[in-house]
Amino acid sequence: MDPIPSRDRERQRLAGWRAPLAIVSSGLIAFLTLSGLFILFAPFSTAAQMAVLVHTLIGIAAIVPCSWYLARHWRHYWQFTLSHILVLGYVGGAALLVCAVSGAVVTWQAAAQTRISAGWDLVHIVTTFAILAFVVAHVLVIILKDRRARAASPAPAAAAGYAKGAALVTALAAALVAIAAVTYGPAASRTSFPEDYSYKYGKDRPFAPSLARTADNGAVNARVFSGSLTCGTAGCHDEIVAEWEPSAHRYAAMDAAFQKIQMNMAQQNGPESTRYCGGCHDPISLFSGTKNLFVEAGRLTALEGYQEGVSCLVCHSIRKVDVKGNANYVIARPARYLFELEYAQSGGRALRLARDFLIRAYPKQHVNDLSKRLFKAPEYCAACHKQFIDQEINNVGWVQLQNQYDNWRQSRWNHPRDARRTIECRECHMPLVASRDPAAGDGLDYNRSASDGKHRSHRFIASNQMMPKLLKLRGWEKHVELTERWLRGRYEIPEIEHKWRKGAVVTLDIDVPERVRPGQDVHLRMQLASNKVGHDFPTGPLDIIQTWLEIVVTDEAGRAVFTRGTVDDKGFIDPGTFMFKAEPVDQYGNLIDRHNLWEMVGVRYRRALFPGFADSAEFTFPAPRSAHRLEVRARLRYRKADQFLVNFMFGENSGLTSPITDMADAQGAILVEGELPARGAAAPAGSE
């Protein structure tokens, strides 16, 4: 028997329908449910993002009134005889409780941590559907039952009033979203080219002679692709930003050599010619239309993007690449979240917190826009790490320049469709490091998992040990240390050690005779082999880079009896030194010695090592008459810029020189024995 008299039950029902707390709580729950579904299924937009913010704020505000209402509601009806209506109510109430708890957890994670939990997010979504299934059914069954059984009673009218009141509350909350979305004025992501912009290569190729282009061929506001440091201020990608800051990608536009050479190019060929360099070195300036007017060096720092070079968003916004090289890629504007551009422009803690919260709480667009399988392919690197000049640049014809991609593709390191034997660009230059980054883990790599707690280093360690130190970029000390280790072959990469070579990057072996007679010619032979390099060694601009052999032979007293490849006190290397480099020339046969590649038509000398190949150098000198033992030391030395170019960039009185790294060395000893042959006498049988 029902312990509650029917008259009291009727009174409670009417009071329940008419209670302001019930109407407001139901309206808030309805809004939270519907806005949650809107966020889940609607495309990324200002309205969807405003819905996230309003949903969160109302969700927090609704905790107390809704909890109080549910507690009172349960207290009124828990003594009733169990029925399908009560079962629906109990299950719906449990779903509401779990949804509220999961919502609170997700909100806290989005506000205070670096990412929301996939598990808690799933619980929040599933319980939203449970609310739809059980709470709505609970209310509708009661309304239908009242309409059938009590047509003459005031219950249906009360229920109708309840429904209207709840709908009004829901509509008011939804109106907040609509008003916020309509009144929000986002910072412009588009821009227009300057009125005096030079379309030297045609209006259909506004970024030429660079092959880089935007998806719509239009200019892009510099703020869209800049603001890399803000990727770290939220605490999400701070490890990656710290790696990127002293990297070659970061200082691609700041590089003093690049700026000097670009200035020289602008003076000779006009400022629009520097767009040739912009796609790889200075894409933010290129796409914003800045590389149009001549800019004095002192004003460079005022250009947006100058201090970012290849920024986070430039790399992660590329949508299509072509292995032709010369920055042959298509870049698209990433969909920016609310307050991102405003924060990049003016800063402010409130803007940053709102931006960070939105990206974490509503990450699907962030992930879809900026995480692509394309980034993992060597072809992606080829867009910039392959270079040529053609008639548009040199007014003569096509000439191949540095080409790391094809070197690698044709090398022993590439085994198509066999990832376990192949070593790709990122495996060497972006080795795995321990990580707490939200993007850590990768279930698509053959040797990784989605929970391996690692990310690929964004230092892009290679061979420039000069510029990070010269620019004094944050973290340059560590970066230079790692670069030195890399050049010496001492940088360990555990995940590929089973398929990579051990030892020096380029091995150096020395072949010397065991003994010679005084005055006899001494023959030295140096054997160099490319051991760990995935492309030509050296690679990059070989008219700038210098890799050479230094040979020093001393007697037992330490006196030098023969030298080659030594560096004088002004930073210049001995003439006639064995050297890996290139000597490009212009159409008149003049040497290209200031990296003025826009005048280049060919090469008069080039020496480099293909992966796995070897080269040798031979030297001859007469054995000293007074020595008894000779010590031979050979060093393979490397520096990023020759002294002539350094002097051109900074002046002869700057005192600057490019740091030198000894990549490999070898020693040998020679005994000097026997009588000095008589003048004109034949050498003994069997002697050299």
Image (tube, rainbow, N blue to C red):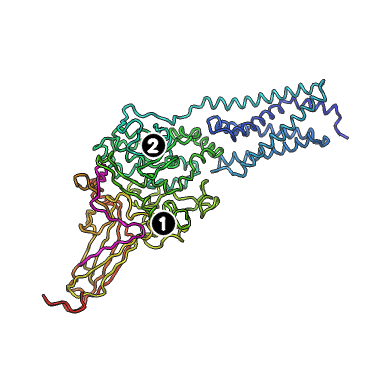
Q: Quadrant of residue 60?
A: top right
- Under circle 2, the secondary element is strand
| 180 lies left or right of 158 | left
Cα separation between marks 1 and 2: 31 Å
Depth check: 614 or 438 in front?
614
Q: Is residue 410 above or below residue 681?
A: above
Residue 213 badge: 2
Q: Which residue is mark 1?
A: 413
Depth check: 377 or 594 in front?
377
Q: Is residue 89 visible?
A: yes
Residue 66 spot, x, y in % from top left: 69, 32
Identified at 51% across, 27% down, the residue is 184
Q: Residue reaching furthest right? A: 1
Q: Is residue 70 above or below residue 581?
A: above
**Kind of residue at disc 2:** Arg
Residue 90 spot, x, y in % from top left: 75, 37
**Callout 1 crowding tier (Cα within 10 Å): few <14, some 14–19, many ≥20:** many
